[in-house]
Amino acid sequence: MSSEPVISLRGVRAELGSRPVLRGIDLTVGRGEVVALLGANGSGKSTAIRTVIGQVPVSEGEIELFGVPRRRFNDWRRVGYVPQRTTAAGGVPATITEIVASGRLSRARFGMLRKADHAAVQRAIALVGLADRAKDSVNALSGGQHQRVLIARALAAEPELLIMDEPMAGVDLASQEVLARTLREQVAQGATVLLVLHELGPLEPLIDRAVVLRDGCVLHDGPPPQAVGQHALPGHDHVHPHAAHDAEPIRTGLLS
Amino acid sequence: MEFLDYAFMQRALLAAVLVGITAPAIGIYLVQRRQALMGDGIGHVAMTGVGLGFLLNTSPVWMATGVSVVGAVLMELIRWYGKTRGDIALAMLFYGGMAGGVMFINLAPTGSNANLTSYLFGSLSTVSESDVTAICVLAALVVLVTIGLRRQLFAVSQDEEFARVTGLPVRALNLLTAITAAVTVTVAMRVVGLLLVSALMVVPVAAAQQLTRSFAATFAIAVAIGVSVTIGGTVTSYYQDVPPGATIVLLTIGAFIALTALATPLARRRARAAAAEGASQSAGDPAECVIPASREAADRAGV
């Protein structure tokens, strides 16, 4: 672990609407570290991650990525992001390759993908074990496979930092193992990881440090807490239904 | 092929082909973003532009382009800032645009609701030389954007949040999509009419995706369907004296129904082929069919 932090949040506050969600968060992720953000629903862990990538505006405090203030940071090829999604599909059919290729755009100039870029895309698909389905539509995939596609998309740019929002939510066991293995390989190659988790689960051995949030404050920052009771059972799969961000019943599409 | 002898039919066919290309080309990104009805909204706003064109005695096509671009940008801004009351704001924009069109055209000395009708439902025989020039220029712009920036537009339309983290200028690309859609509406206005434009943006894409698995193929087939129905509708309206806009839209819906009927056996055959392949190399995903082992009914939220 070198001295220069990859991610650093100092006294970060953020509101969603008028409701304060983060009330002064300090968080540092050093190079090569694997940090898990834990906490109950509504504790602010997803919001914390989304302030880092600039999706949620910060009302107070400072965020730095690779030592650069986030507002001025533009070296996005170093960052791979896995948003919290239940699906990788959009309103039009798209193949796994097409979706993963969009993750390579941060390294492409003017959106032109060269031979090396296409090779990197296929490598990322192979990493998550979907090489034989690269030309299939994502609509034909299971929930766990959707998550694998989202992770391959983040890996396509060969990032140094991976930011993941609940990559294990609603993922079947086979895909959980593939994801844990993929992550292990990335960490072995020196990747830095910040991920939101509901519980440590199969990723537990990888995690260096756990930061637990409650009501928008840091409650614990240190070694991962020990799982107790039924949570400690191997293969304990803890799935909460999250309202998908696009789940409202009537959609005219004009406001989405 | 006697209809090719008439200059007005040559102009009409050229305009029709350009509309058949551009409407699905931008429409596919709107469908991908699940904003299929955006074209309809822009069409309403463009009516004010047509009315203003008559009132100020300038070209209704260029005026409609200007006004619908402004309207599309406003819609995009409402999407950013007005999530809570956004639907009300959009409704006011749409119907305000429509009312403005009717008002202005009736104030204009040369205008009447009859003029407006040709813009609402399309009228090939009145496509003028200068209209064709405008349509060509605007269509070139739309093709340039939708094909030249296809990877960027695909990424932003697929997942806006992720696109931001790849460093793409998401807001600029959203604005560009809105503006391109507005331009397409005015390109298509003379051929299918403002009220039917949206159908040509959405239905060919919906028809194409009955058959396809990839975005690229959906794009190509949607444009092919678009060109076929606009040519078919134009020629039909020449021989049968039926309104071209309505003919084109009905043909498009016919294509959708035909492809949907075709898609069911095709999907079944694909599934059978996939199953056969899976049996021959059953390595695939063994646990995919297994129910996760240790789910318990009384699962409590933890950590």
Image (cartoon, grey):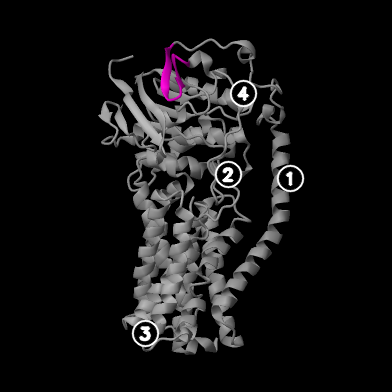
| Chain part drawn in magenta | A207-222
Pair 2/3: label in front: 3
Residue toward you, B44 or B167: B44
Check the residue under mark 4 and report the chain it is in.
A
Q: Tag on residue B272?
A: 1
- Secondary structure found at label 1: helix
Q: Tag on residue A238?
A: 4
Instruction: Give the quarter of the figure containing the C terminus of chain B.
Output: top right
Residue type pointed to by label 2: Ala
Check the residue under mark 1 and report the chain it is in.
B
Read off the residue under disc 2. Answer: A247
- Secondary structure found at label 4: loop
Q: Residues within 10 Å of mark 4 (few under 14, many from 20)?
A: many
Residue type pointed to by label 4: His
B108 on left or right of A3? right
Q: Tag on residue B108?
A: 3
The secondary structure making up most of the magenta span is strand
User: In the rendered image, which quarter is residue B149 located in?
Assistant: bottom left
Distance in Å between CA atoms under marks 2 and 1: 32 Å
Q: Position of residue A142 (x, y in %)?
A: 63, 36
Q: Position of residue A237 (x, y in %)?
A: 63, 22
Disc 1 and disc 4 in contact, CB within 8 angstroms: no
Q: What residue is rendered at 48% in x and 47% in y?
A: B158
Residue type pointed to by label 3: Ala
Q: What residue is rendered at 54% in x and 23% in y?
A: A198
Distance in Å between CA atoms under marks 3 and 4: 67 Å
Disc 2 and disc 1 in contact, CB within 8 angstroms: no
Pair 3/4: label in front: 3
Check the residue under mark 2 and report the chain it is in.
A
Q: Residues within 10 Å of mark 2 (few under 14, many from 20)?
A: few
